[in-house]
Amino acid sequence: MAKGTVAYKIIRDHLVSGKLITGEEIAIRIDQTLTQDATGTMAYLQFEAMGVDRVKTELSVSYIDHNMLQTDFKNPDDHKYLMSVAKRYGIWLSKPGNGICHQVHVERFAKPGRTLLGSDSHTPTSGGVGMIAIGAGGLDVAAAMAGEPFYLKMPKIVGVKLSGRLPEWVTAKDIILELLRRLTVKGGVGKIFEYFGEGVKELSVPERATITNMGAELGATTSVFPSDEITRAYLKAQGREGDWVELLPDPDAEYDEVVEINLSELEPLIACPHSPDRVVPVREVEGVKVDQVVIGSCTNSSFVDLIRAGSMLRGKKVHPDVVFAVAPGSKQALELITQEGVLLNFLKAGARILESACGPCIGMGYAPPSGGVSVRSFNRNFEGRSGTPDAKVYLASPEVCVASAIAGEIVDPRRLAEKENINWISVKMPERFPYGDEAFIPPLPEEEAKGVEIYRGPNIRALPEFDELPEDIQGEVSLIVGDNITTDHIMPAGAKILPLRSNIYAISEYVYHYVDPEFLLRAKKIRDEKGKANVIIGGENYGQGSSREHAALAPRFLGVRAVIAKSFARIHHANLVNFGIVPLEFLDKEDYGKFSLGDELEIPGLLERLKEGKEVVVINKATGEEVLCRYNLTPKQVSVLLAGGLLNWIKKKQGVPL
Ligand code: MIC
Ligand code: SF4
C-alpha cells in the first residue's frame, strides 16, 4: 500500500473520502489550481455556470501561454476574458509572454506537500518540488476552484530508484526517455512514479521537473520527487524559502513496484517519430539530415537547459541548412540568460529567439517544412502536431538538439563535443533568481472583485446544454480507430483550430479532421437525419496525451454518446464521463474486430445496467452478434453520467437551476 512514501503521505494528508487502497475511489482536497488559456476559457465558463462567488482554493493561477499568435481578434478576446475573470474571482493572472504555465508555476508557486490540479496534462511538472500535481479536464479544475475535492482511483505508487551518476552529456531528459523506452506510453496508467535513491541528489529542481513533466507521456497520474535540501536551496533562491517543508520517504517505505535506473549506464537517447516511446540511443540514428531544431516547451526550457545549450554554442555557428530556434520557458529564464550573457551566444550562432510560450510544441508557428526533420527538446511528437502533417519530429535533450543544429544532422553530443572541442559544463544554481513578477496580476480584494464586469468578445460562445443519459442507446458506428489514439487526433490544435477553443460550435467542425475528413458529415447525419447516437470503436490507450476536454465536449456536441475501446487513457476517460459520453471496454478484446463502419447498434437497458453495476450488452444489429462490455467507473462517475455530465451534476448539487 506504499505507506511511508512521499506520494502516500501527501495524499493521506489531503484525503476527504475513501480508503488508501490501490484502485479504490478516493477524493482529495485541492490546494492550488492552474489553467492555461487554451483550456482555461472553457474551464472558467464552466466555473461561472457553477454560481460560486470566489475561488475556494489557497491559490489559483490563470496562465496565458498557448494561444499566442493573435492573427485576429479571437485570441486577444480570449485573453481579455481571462483577465477579467481572474479579477472577478480572486485568481492570479500570468500575462502573455510571462512563460509556459508549468515552468512558471515551479518557479513562483509550487509548494512541497501541497496538491495542485491543472487543466493541462503536464501539470505534474510541479511534482519536481515534491507536490502532488495532477492534470485534469477544465471542468474538474473548475469544480476544484468551486471547492469540490478531486476524485480519482488510488493509484499504484511505483518507486523509481536512481543509483549512480549521470555521465557527461547524459541528462534528466535521458532518464525519462529511458523510462518511456522500457514502459511505453501506456506503461504508467493508474500509477504515480516517485523517485528515490542516491541519484536524486544529483538532480537540480529544474532537472527533476523535466522528469516529472514527461512522466505524463507514460500515461501516469503524476510523478513526484522528495523535497530535500536541493529543493530548499531552489526555493530560497526564488525568495520562497518559507514555502519549503522537508518531505522524504520513510526509511522503511515500501513501494507497490520498484523500477531501477543506474544513471552511470545511461547514454544520450532520442524518441523517433511519431511517439515519445519510440526511444533509441542517439548513435543509432546519427546522420539523419535535420531541417530545423528548437529548444523550448515545458519539458526543457529552464535556465539550466538554456545556459548549457547557450554555452555549447559559444563561438559556434548553426549549420547553414538548419534553422534553429530557442523559446525560453519563462521570462525569468530569459532574464537570467540575458544577465549571464548567454543570450548573445544564441544570437551570434544564428538562432531565432521565440517568445516564452508553448509555440511550436502545439503547432503555433515555426512548423517544419514539408516532410522535414525537426529535432526538439519537447515532450510530444505525435503525427501532425507540429503543424506539418508529414514532418518527422524527434525528441531529445537540449544538448542533443544543439549538437544536431551545429552538425546539420542528428549526432551524439559526445562525438560532436570531441570533434568541435566543446566542454561539458555543470550549471551553477544562482543565489537569487530574477523573480520576474512584473507580469503577474495578483487577485483583487473580495469587495473590489465583486464589482468587476466580465468581458466577453464575439469569440466566446456559451456552452451548449446537454441532456441526460437515455434509457437505451440506439446508435451507429461512425468511426473505428486503432491503438494509442491521441487527443491531437480527436481534436487537433495548431494555429487554425486552437483559437476556436472558446466556441464549441466552430471547433466541433474539426473533430477527427485529419484522421477521417468524412467523419464530421457522417456524425451529423447520424445525429440529425437518423436521430441516433454516434458510437466510436477504439483500441488500446484511447485518448492519450493532452487534457483538452474539447476532445470529449466537441464529439458529444456531434452526438457521440458512447466510445467502446480496448482501454482508455486516464484524463480522457474522465473527460468523456464529464461530458456524458459512456466509456465502455470490451470484456474480450478480440470483440474489437466484430464491428464495421455503419453498423447499427443497440445498447439495451444501459441506464439500469450502469445503476446496478452490471456488464453492458452491445447488440450489433448488422451481424446479430452480442458483445459484452464492462466499464471502469466509480459510483460518482455513474451518477455524473446519469445526470448527463459533471456540470449538470454540480449544478444540481449546488442548487443552481439547470
Ligand atoms: C498539449 O501539450 O497538448 C496541451 C496543448 O498543452 C494540452 C492542453 C490543451 O490541449 O490545451 C495538454 O497537454 O493538456
Ligand atoms: Fe505547452 Fe507543449 Fe507544454 Fe503542452 S506540452 S503545456 S503545448 S509546452
Image (cartoon, rainbow, N blue to C red):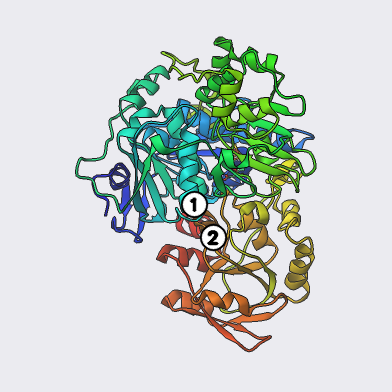
Q: Residue at x 73, y 70 (%)?
A: 527
Residue furthest to the left: 252
Q: Position of residue 413 (x, y in %)?
A: 57, 29
- Which kind of residue does numbered mark 2 sit on? Asn
Q: In the rendered structure, find residue 327 and report the number of the disc placed on it.
A: none
Q: Position of residue 535 (x, y in %)?
A: 64, 71
Q: Position of residue 523 (x, y in %)?
A: 74, 67
Query: Observer-nearest residue: 121 or 175?
Result: 175
Task: Report whether residue 460 is seen.
Answer: no
Residue carrying label 1: 219
Query: Observer-nearest residue: 73 or 479?
Result: 479
Which secondary structure lies at badge 2?
A: loop
Residue furthest to the front: 419
Whether the residue carrying mark 2 lies under 8 Å from ligand 1 is answered with no
Mark 2 residue crowding within 10 angstroms, few (<14) / some (14–19) / many (20+) = many
Q: Residue at x 67, y 37 (%)?
A: 287
Q: Earlier in the sequence, mark 2 or mark 1?
A: 1
Q: Is residue 248 left or right of residue 64?
A: left
State the image quarter where residue 263 is shown.
Answer: top left
Pointers 2 and 1 in contact (C-beta within 8 Å): yes
Q: In the rendered structure, find residue 541 and report the number of the disc placed on it.
A: 2
Q: Is residue 614 above or below residue 640?
A: below
Which secondary structure lies at badge 1?
A: loop
- Which kind of residue does numbered mark 1 sit on? Gly
Q: Residue at x 46, y 78 (%)?
A: 615
Query: Observer-nearest residue: 477 or 525?
Result: 477
Please tell me how many numbered marks the rendered image carries: 2
Q: Quadrant of the C terminus?
A: bottom right
State the image quarter where residue 256 is shown.
Answer: bottom left
State the image quarter where residue 66 is shown.
Answer: top right
- Quarter of the rendered structure image containing ligand 1: top right
